[in-house]
Amino acid sequence: MSGFSSYVILDFGHGINAQVEKLPKSGIFSAIVTPFIVESYKLLEIQDPSQPSPSFFGRDGYKVRVNAMWFSSLIFSLVAALISIHCKQWLDGYGVRYLPTFN
């Protein structure tokens, strides 16, 4: 493997290290967003059975839109943490296997 490739792997590894250090913040964000999701999900319950369920663009559509935003923020946060962990593990494994050793 060339010196440039090993430099690129090391550089990516150091960049991912900075992102992995932010993972506790992602966990805290997820822990904070979850109670908001629980409370806003109650808005979707139908109080009067004769009323139709709220549609996305209807008069009460803000309830659906707010819930969609809360759920998407939680999902994006968790997916970003998952991807960064997998990238870090892949780079660590790739670097250990292919980087030259200096004796």
Image (cartoon, rainbow, N blue to C red):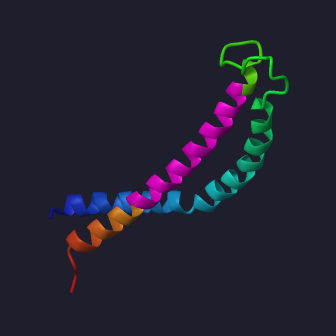
Quadrant into which the C terminus falls: bottom left
Q: Position of residue 51 (x, y in %)?
A: 79, 17
Which residue is found at the position 38% from the left and 65% from the top? 89
70 within the magenta span: yes
Say which of 65 and 82 sits in front. 65
Which residue is found at the position 72% from the left and 49% from the top? 34
Majority secondary structure of the magenta segment? helix
Instruction: Judge left or right: residue 17 versus residue 21.
Output: left
Say which of 42 and 13 sits in front. 42
Quadrant into which the N terminus falls: bottom left
Q: Position of residue 60 (x, y in %)?
A: 77, 18
Residue bounds of the magenta highlight: 64-87
Which residue is found at the position 67% from the left and 14% from the top? 57
Q: Position of residue 81 (x, y in %)?
A: 52, 54
Relative height, residue 91 to residue 97 (above, below): above
42 within the magenta span: no
Give the residue furthest to the bottom. Answer: 103
Picture quadrant where residue 96 is located: bottom left
Relative height, residue 53 to residue 98 (above, below): above
Say which of 25 and 62 sits in front. 62
Relative height, residue 53 to residue 68 (above, below): above
Picture quadrant where residue 41 is located: top right
Give the residue furthest to the right. Answer: 47
